[in-house]
Amino acid sequence: MRYLTTLVFPPYGMILAERFGSAVGCVLLETLALATWRYGIGGALHAVCMLWALNALSGHDEAQRMRRFGRDVRRYRLFGR
């Protein structure tokens, strides 16, 4: 569901990925996309925002997965001491 809402409104995906500075830049880019929509460039700008936000969101998910894995490894002391 998070990825679907990111496709519609990319700055929301940036907020979910905890990248607040990038979310501001994405809002500005989306505003420019809406302003230039009828000239054909708006669709391309929206696509760039979507890809940027999806990349940020998937990177955030992967970082959380790795944090959980590291916590589990430390808890069970599978490696070391």
Image (spheres, rainbow, N blue to C red):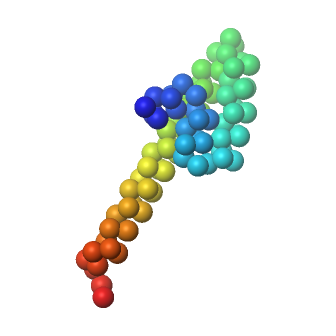
Q: Nearer the viewer, residue 17 or 22?
A: 17
Identify which residue is drawn at 62% across, 35% down. 11
Please indicate, yes or no, whether residue 41 appears anywhere in the rendered image: no
Quarter of the view holding residue 46 = top right
Q: Where is residue 73 drawn, in percent x and y?
A: 31, 71
* Residue 51 position (above or below residue 19): above
| 57 lies left or right of 35 | left
> If the image is split into quadrants, where does the C terminus sit?
bottom left
> If the image is split into quadrants, where does the N terminus sit?
top left
| 59 lies left or right of 37 | left
Q: Where is residue 34 drawn, in percent x and y?
A: 69, 20
Please indicate, yes or no, whether residue 79 appears anywhere in the rendered image: yes
Quarter of the view holding residue 35 = top right
Identify which residue is drawn at 61% across, 48% down. 19
| 35 lies left or right of 8 | right
Q: Where is residue 55 drawn, in percent x and y?
A: 49, 43
Q: Nearer the viewer, residue 43 or 67?
A: 67
| 5 lies left or right of 62 | right
* Residue 76 position (above or below residue 27): below
Identify which residue is drawn at 42% across, 63% down. 67
Q: Where is residue 59 drawn, in percent x and y?
A: 47, 50
* Residue 14 position (above or below residue 39): below
